[in-house]
Image (cartoon, rainbow, N blue to C red):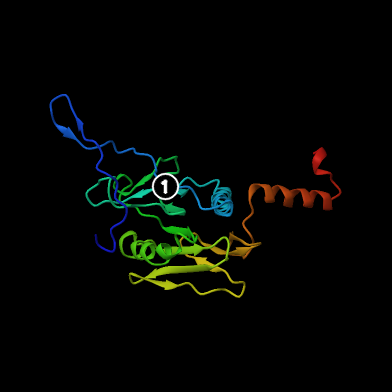
Amino acid sequence: MSALTTETLPPQPEQASANGIILPPPGDLYSDEPPLESYQHLQQLILLLKCLDWLWKDRTDYFSAGNLTVYYSARKLKSEDFRGPDFFVVLDTEKRPRKSWTVWEEGGKYPNLIVELLSDSTAKIDRELKKQIYQDIFRTPDYFWFDPHSLEFEGFHLVDGTYQPIPLTEQGWRWSQQLGLYLGIHQNQLRFFNAERQLVPTPEERNEILAAKLRALGVDPDTV
């Protein structure tokens, strides 16, 4: 197995049609990813999805997902060559639900951005093997990783085919060219910040901000 070969499933049963022709397995298999490592990992994943979807609520040209399998076999087989990024975004695609992301069924598109959430069992793979796969096969322009426990945070941008570290701002954030957003740590969680360096809120936080503004105007938001 080469260094860039990923997980391989047992051979899937072939289907025989009425005329005896052997057909490949169905192409709509569900994602097949293990559960997240901890409550913090789950909350972090939900936070990234919630904030981006709220910020881009009027857009229909992207797909974001968490803990979803990306199938990318050159032979178009779902029994080989697949990975499950913790969080990823694909741009210039249709915003609709998917059971998994199958590259050959999506016009050859790979994720534009990937975030891996490090854990004791995955950190080495995320820093080494996955980084190499995302660089050399996926050609994903922006790759970040974050540890919800130790708060380790790194980011890379693809330059001439090689990942180069994304420099930190004075706030300790890193810029994603693909999203047009900063990623940085806020209250021990990885968050998005817009180009004006404002925190991208969750819907709940947005409501709290609006409520505070109403109170400042002498209006009780609970009675509006």
Kindly identify the residue that appears in the image at 44 percent across and 48 percent down.
34
State left or right for residue 177 relative to residue 188. Answer: left
Q: In the displayed structure, would residue 191 be above or below residue 35? A: below
Q: Which residue is mark 1?
A: 33
Q: Position of residue 69 (x, y in %)?
A: 39, 48
Q: Residue furthest left?
A: 20
Q: Residue furthest top?
A: 18
Q: Residues within 10 Å of mark 1 (few under 14, many from 20)?
A: some
The C terminus - image quarter = top right
Q: For this rendering, which residue is in front, 27 or 107? A: 27
Q: Residue at x 27, y 51 (%)?
A: 73
177 and 78: which one is in front? 78
Image side of residue 21 versus residue 181, left or right: left
| Three-letter residue code for mark 1 | Glu
Is 20 placed left or right of 218 in the picture? Answer: left
Compared with 55, 159 (above or below) is below
At which x and y percent is residue 109?
A: 34, 52
Please, which residue is most extreme toward the right here? Answer: 218
Provide residue 107's location: percent of width, then percent of height.
31, 48
Please report the residue visible at 31 percent of the width from the left and 56 percent of the height from the top. Answer: 6
Who's the residue at 54% across and 46% down the image? 58
Quarter of the rendering containing residue 149: bottom right
> How many circles with numbers are drawn on the protein?
1
